[in-house]
Image (cartoon, rainbow, N blue to C red):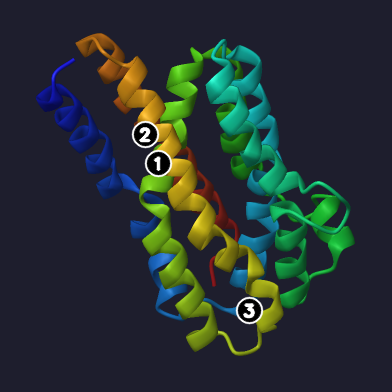
Amino acid sequence: MTTTDTDTLVEALRSQSQRYHDQHPFHVKMNEGRLSRRQIQGWVANRFYYQENIPRKDAAILANCPDVEVRRRWIRRILDHDGTVNGEGGIEAWLALSEAVGLTREEVLDERHLVPGVRFAVDAYVTFARTRPWVEAVASSLTELFAPDLMSERLAAFERSYPWVDRDGLAYFRARLDQAPRDSEHALEVVTEHCRSAEEQERAVAALSFKCDVLWSMLDAIDRAYAD
């Protein structure tokens, strides 16, 4: 594949940022400080279902991936979220965020606030990772190309507009400032290396488009459930 082909693929992948969930009205209101306490709590509680399923999605990619070098690097994603001991990792950090916004761990873990549309979207994403070719599943993760700026803006928005949120609970966002660029760089390397034909590149872009739909659908469901 020529350099031009690679550049074209990367440009096509990055163009999906126009469909990213940071442009959803609910997310825009969050960053502008216009969400109520109830809406913030609803978002945190529902987003937890996505967070706790990320390691399952990544485990599915590992199970389908025949490339040992890719597996050695990809497994770090699972460790980032699950941690290596109790009390560590992204899932634990999100539970800390839940407490910081006034929820209990129990009510987040027992899914009492989980909206059906969020469950459906997240389950569809995990199924996609399990059943589609592993490179397409890797491509679907490339929303992380857009995540560094998103996390910076989200962190600033919470610190600026939601003073009632305990600042110690924002550790998840701070960790992703470093993790997301690392992860997206690796995923982009994998996709550009393995997607050589026009058909493979189209499927990679379609996979990323699907992931954008998943995230957007989650916010649609949360917005409807917690409308003021």
What is the spatial separation of the Cα atoms under label 3 and label 1, in whole angstroms?
Answer: 35 Å
| Residue neighbourhood size for the residue with mark 2, other residues' Cα within 10 Å, grouped as few (<14), some (14–19), many (≥20) | many
Residue 50 image point, x, y percent: 63, 45
Disc number placed over residue 185 in the picture, else none? 1
Left or right: residue 69 versus residue 147 is right
Residue 106 at x, y percent in the picture: 89, 59
Cα gap from disc 1 to disc 2, whole angstroms:
5 Å
Which secondary structure lies at badge 2?
A: helix
Tell me where residue 178 appears, x and y as whole percent.
51, 58
Disc 3 + disc 2, Cβ < 8 Å = no
Picture quarter with the N terminus? top left
What amino acid does circle 3 point to? Arg
User: Which amino acid type is marked by label 1?
Assistant: Glu
The residue wearing badge 3 is: 37
Residue that badge 2 annotates: 188
> Residue most toward the left?
4
**Amino acid at the residue labelled 2:** Leu
| Picture coordinates of residue 223, whole percent (x, y) | 51, 59
Q: Which residue corresponds to the image point at 73% horizontal and 76% vertical from the top-left?
A: 100
Structural crowding at the residue carrying mark 3, measured as other residues with C-alpha within 10 Å and reported as few (<14), some (14–19) or many (≥20): some
